[in-house]
Image (spheres, grey):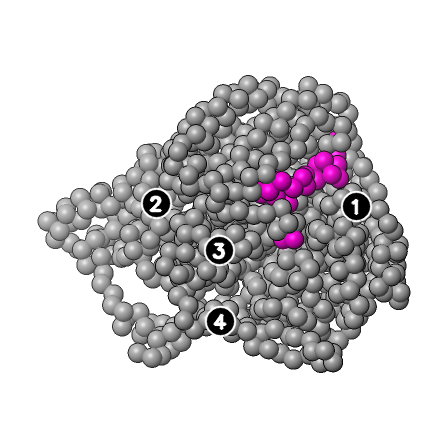
């Protein structure tokens, strides 16, 4: 892979390069769009994270890009010093994932993106005062009291278009036309899996366009983290995507460990991998249950939850909780595994093949089930990459993106397992990929369960954890896809900025794309097959 | 469970005292008891879950904990058909008006259970700019179930407390009150002004 200096240097000679964990280029905003095109052409076509940040003297964004060819990661920083009317060029035409992520940055920092098609707030009410993640945000509750009246429905949006002469004009945009028939689905709706709202424009039974409205469970975790010590931030990771609590904790712990320069002892690493895979199985089982329930097969929910309870029992004995585990800590584990852990996991491994067979007998072959899923909700490989859909949903579109394989962490590099990739691109394959991943997870656990090494379960770390100055990004493969944590440290006990980068916002963003033209009843199955978790969208 | 095994007995006793002191017709009293027996054993929850606590609520419905044993199994997706609302999860600013409307749509007599730290006080997110610091700021709450998330057993305990409360209530001329739309708007001038200005 060509050095990023070569790629960027051709289009933008005045870029500055900084030494960091990864290659980092600081690009002036005027050239940023050209640089982005050049990077994409050089196979850096997966925008894995777009992090808005208030750097103190400037506002700006960090872009993390991953090459789909060799999986190397680079980062680019673009800033603007204007605090009154900050503007940066949009890259939403290059990477579609940026459409919603730039709206998020606008919501939190007030940075307007030039040439972005639809610059509205994403999470907060449209009458919200201020930009909460700026360092000078006024927390006074009088400015933003709990408002009990509904916000005005807002079809008027704006796009900041740059003319040929470089002048920027605000062009009004309408989300829905005047004659469109818009049906509101959610936020309180049993099939949206949480408090998510789709404003759906219909033509008869066909979906023409969906406007995603989120923020009904936006809890402001990123801002909260800025006032907490590093060990105190870990428990939030159980409460966003609560089904993949352990992989998420794994991510934040290894990010902090990387910054501190400690390595978890091998025993901890092996146990972490086993627990991650147990959560993955539990999560996919719940997916199986709720997905089938969306299709009307209520019995399947009880089957799926039956095995999930077995896993929760195992985890409860070791971690002390059924859902909010808070089990991993910086340097290793909070406690050693319970004495029943190994035998119980073995019991689980013994019953799972039978259970899986039962699930398949129950639903997979069913004609109604297949007809409702096959060739429904087609997501092409190009779209999956452009929208940054990692995880099982992306792998069902023929895109091998499993972080455990591409950028191995912990002991995944030594293990023998397959990355499940299918190329049906439809809801049915998204379902099958998850069912097959359960088998692969079992294979991983089988290899490790008899080989948990003796020794310490937690490395020695300082009592008060201060990270050196710098920034870090760490990715893991969580149950729904790549999950990343970005930490910017100014050498203090608390992070200067902590960004949580889940996959679910991306999954929800493609609902619009892949439901267009299908029937409204398919919206439910397509949404179910993507398996997003709403608190992870909103954070 | 036996009477002595419950906590909060004084609260229920004081409710009973209150009822007795107001005096009641024997026939109506017996009818009340019968109706309340029926009501308390078929309380229908609203399917309402915003986050993590909601998942434990799903576990309640599954085979291992099985809330059908207590008559709670008929979870309704429409508030108009439900008796009570388990508020399982964080309520944030944007959700607050929606949540309030759901509450108003529940048919009388209605009850609210606050499940988990978030619903009770904002929980781990209390200091956030976007989280409501306890749902009792918005709606009246009957039972609080602490935990993060509460164990399913704890949820049952809370649900049983609600049943006990229902059992000692006065149905006729008591909880079975009639409130009209006009009453509601009189009590909530702000909502009336914002949302029904045209009327
Ligand atoms: S109380 Fe805890 S488990 Fe329940 S919603 Fe809040 S954070 Fe989640």
Q: Badge 4: few (under 14), some or many (20 or more) residues near its Cα, within 10 Å?
A: some
The x and y percentages for residue A291 are: 46, 40
Cα gap from disc 1 to disc 3, whole angstroms: 34 Å
Cα gap from disc 3 to disc 2, whole angstroms: 32 Å
Q: Residue at x 34, y 62 (%)?
A: B104
Which residue position holds label 3?
A: A516
Which residue position holds label 1?
A: A72
The x and y percentages for residue A314 are: 57, 28
Using the image, name the chain to which the residue with label 3 belongs.
A
Magenta span covers which residues?
A386-411
Using the image, name the chain to which the residue with label 4 belongs.
A
Closer to the camera in the image, B71 or B195: B195
Closer to the camera in the image, B39 or A415: A415
The dot on residue A532 is none
Cα gap from disc 4 to disc 1, whole angstroms: 41 Å
Quarter of the picture holding the C terminus of chain B: bottom left
Using the image, name the chain to which the residue with label 1 belongs.
A
Q: Is residue A386 visible?
A: yes
Q: Earlier in the sequence, mark 1 or mark 3?
A: 1
The x and y percentages for residue A397 are: 60, 42
Which residue position holds label 4?
A: A155
The x and y percentages for residue A256 are: 76, 46
Cα gap from disc 2 to disc 4, whole angstroms: 34 Å
Q: Earlier in the sequence, mark 3 or mark 4?
A: 4
């Amino acid at each position: 892979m060509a050095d990023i200096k070569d790629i960027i240097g051709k289009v933008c000679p005045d870029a500055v390069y900084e030494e960091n964990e990864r290659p980092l280029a600081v690009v002036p905003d005027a050239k940023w769009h050209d640089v982005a095109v050049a990077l994409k052409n050089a196979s850096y076509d997966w925008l894995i994270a777009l992090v808005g940040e208030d750097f103190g003297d400037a506002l700006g964004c960090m872009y993390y890009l991953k090459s789909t060819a060799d999986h190397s990661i680079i980062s680019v920083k673009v800033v603007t010093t204007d605090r009154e009317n900050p503007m940066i060029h949009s890259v939403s035409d290059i990477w579609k994932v940026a459409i919603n992520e730039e709206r998020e940055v606008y919501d939190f920092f007030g940075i307007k993106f030039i040439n972005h098609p639809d610059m509205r707030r994403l999470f907060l009410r449209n009458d919200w005062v201020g930009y909460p993640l700026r360092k000078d945000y006024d927390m006074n509750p009088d400015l933003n009291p709990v408002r009990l009246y509904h916000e005005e429905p807002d079809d008027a949006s704006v796009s900041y278009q740059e003319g040929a002469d470089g002048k920027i004009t605000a062009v009004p945009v309408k989300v829905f036309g005047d004659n469109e028939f818009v049906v509101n689905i959610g936020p309180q709706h049993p099939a949206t899996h949480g408090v998510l709202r789709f404003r759906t424009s219909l033509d008869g039974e066909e979906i023409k366009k969906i406007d995603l409205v989120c923020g009904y469970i936006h809890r402001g975790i990123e801002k909260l983290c800025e006032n907490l010590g590093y060990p105190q931030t870990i428990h939030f990771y159980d409460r966003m995507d609560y089904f993949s609590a352990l992989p998420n904790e794994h991510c934040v712990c290894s990010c902090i460990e990387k910054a501190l320069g400690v390595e978890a002892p091998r025993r901890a690493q092996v146990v972490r991998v086993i627990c991650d895979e147990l959560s993955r199985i539990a999560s996919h089982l719940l997916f199986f249950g709720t997905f089938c329930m969306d299709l009307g097969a209520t019995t399947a929910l009880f089957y799926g939850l039956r095995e999930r309870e077995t896993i929760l029992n195992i985890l409860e004995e070791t971690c002390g909780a059924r859902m909010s585990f808070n089990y991993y800590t910086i340097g290793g584990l909070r406690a050693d595994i319970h004495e029943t852990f190994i035998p119980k996991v073995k019991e689980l491994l013994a019953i799972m093949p039978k259970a899986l067979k039962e699930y398949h007998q129950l639903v997979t072959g069913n004609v109604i089930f297949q007809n409702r899923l096959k060739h429904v909700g087609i997501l092409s490989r190009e779209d999956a990459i452009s929208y940054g859909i990692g995880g099982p949903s992306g792998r069902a579109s023929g895109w091998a993106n499993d972080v455990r394989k591409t950028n191995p962490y912990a002991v995944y590099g030594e293990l023998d397992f397959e990355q499940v990739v299918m190329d049906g691109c439809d809801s049915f394959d998204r379902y099958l990929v998850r069912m097959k991943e359960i088998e692969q997870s079992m294979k991983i656990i089988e290899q490790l369960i008899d080989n948990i090494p003796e020794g310490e379960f937690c490395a020695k770390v300082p009592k008060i954890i201060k990270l050196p100055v710098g920034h870090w990004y760490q990715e893991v493969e969580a149950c729904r896809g790549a999950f990343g944590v970005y930490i910017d440290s100014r050498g203090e006990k608390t992070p200067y900025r902590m960004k949580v980068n889940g996959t679910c916002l991306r999954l929800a963003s493609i609902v619009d794309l892949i439901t267009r033209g299908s029937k409204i009843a398919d919206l439910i199955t397509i949404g179910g097959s993507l398996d997003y978790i709403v608190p992870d969208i909103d954070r | 469970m036996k009477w002595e095994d419950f906590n909060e007995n004084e609260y229920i006793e004081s409710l009973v005292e209150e009822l007795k002191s107001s005096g009641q017709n024997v026939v109506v009293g017996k009818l009340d008891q019968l109706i309340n027996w029926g009501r308390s054993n078929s309380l229908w929850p609203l399917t309402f879950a915003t986050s993590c606590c909601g998942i434990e609520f799903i576990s309640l419905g599954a085979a291992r904990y099985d809330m059908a044993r207590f008559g709670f199994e008929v979870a309704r997706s429409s508030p108009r058909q439900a008796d009570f609302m388990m508020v399982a999860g964080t309520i944030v600013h944007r959700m607050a008006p929606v949540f309030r409307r759901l509450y108003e749509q529940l048919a009388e007599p209605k009850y609210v259970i606050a499940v988990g730290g978030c619903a009770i006080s904002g929980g781990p997110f209390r200091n956030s700019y976007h989280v409501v610091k306890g749902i009792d700021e918005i709606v009246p709450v009957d039972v609080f179930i602490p935990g993060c998330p509460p164990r399913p057993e704890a949820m049952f305990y809370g649900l049983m407390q609600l049943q006990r409360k229902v059992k000692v209530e006065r149905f006729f001329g008591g909880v079975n009150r009639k409130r009209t739309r006009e009453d509601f708007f009189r009590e909530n001038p702000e909502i009336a002004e914002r949302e029904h200005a045209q009327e």
